[in-house]
Structures are given as C-alpha cells and as structure tokens.
Image: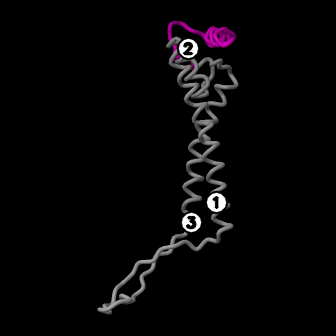
Amino acid sequence: MLVDKKILNDYIDACAYIKETESEIKSLKKSRKTVIDKVRGSNPDFPYQPQSFGIAGTTETYANADLIRSEEHILETQKRQAEELKIQVEEWMEEIPFRMQRIIRYKVFKDLTWGEVAKLMGRRATGDSVRMEFNNFMKK
C-alpha cells in the first residue's frame, strides 16, 4: 500500500469516525422503544386454567423502522470502510523502520511540533532534521 501524508491524516479521521459511528449506532438502537407487558388469559381447552402471557413489541411504525434500519446500514458500511483504512495504515506502519514509526506517531498521530518530536527522538536531533527525514521518507 502506498501511504502518503493525506492517508496518514485520513487515518486519524478514520479512528475518530469509528468511535463516533459506534456511538450513533448505539443511539439509533436505543431509539427503538420496546414495550413489554403481561396479559392474563386461560388455556383454550379444558382444563381452563388461568395463565400469564408475556408480550413484547415496538412502538415504531414500519416506515420509521425502515428508516432506522437504512441509517444503521449506511453507518455500518461507512464504519467498515474507516476500519479498512485503519487496518491498512497499521499494517503499513509495521513494515517501516521503527525510527520512522516513532516520528509518524509523534508528529501525525499525536500532533506534536517538529521541535517536540526531535526532543523525544533524542540523539541530538533537531526539528528541521527530523522534518527533513520524514519528508524524504514520504517521497520514497
């Protein structure tokens, strides 16, 4: 997979999108109101003994239920696409050198400045040297 700066930024958005979408799906599922009640009756045949029966159902109309199912389907599809991008980037990250993994994690994922990245990288690195190393790596 060819990864560039845009895909790395998309990765961050994909991770956030997954969390937001999961929350929206939960919210949609909660909007389905299930009603549970009990009724009393008897057997239709002899012996006519009284019994309690549990009844459950929803208060939504068919149109509303279809709309909710459609929204859930769309959200699930978009979430799946975001998860695929996330996995592709994470697999790519495993293939690159550890030093570059650290630089990408600090700069792109944690949104640190080049100076902060250089300080964490150590070895007398400067913000400019780390930035150039990153830019050269991404050109490959």
Residue 7, by quadrant, is: top right
Residue 47, by quadrant, is: bottom left
Placement of 62 over or under 109, stated as above or below:
below
In the rendered structure, which segment of residues is drawn in magenta? 117-140
Mark 3 or 2 closer to N-term? 3
Q: Distance between the residues labelled 3 and 2?
A: 47 Å
Q: What element carries label 3?
A: loop
| Image mark for residue 100 | 2
Q: Is the magenta stretch mostly helix, strand or loop?
A: helix
Q: Name the residue under label 1.
A: 68
Dot 2: within a 10 Å radius of its alpha carbon, few (fewer than 14), some, or many (20 or more) residues?
some
User: Within the magenta stretch, is there residue 127?
Assistant: yes
Placement of 27 over or under 39, stated as above or below:
above
The residue drawn where x is 50% and y is 74% is: 35
The amino acid at mark 3 is Arg
The amino acid at mark 1 is Ile
Q: How is the image coloured?
A: one colour
Mark 1 or 3 closer to N-term? 3
Mark 2 or 1 closer to N-term? 1
Q: Mark 3 points at which residue?
A: 32
Q: Which residue occupies the extreme front position in the image?
A: 45
Closer-to-camera residue (133/74): 74
Marks 1 and 3 in Cβ contact (< 8 Å) = yes
The amino acid at mark 2 is Met
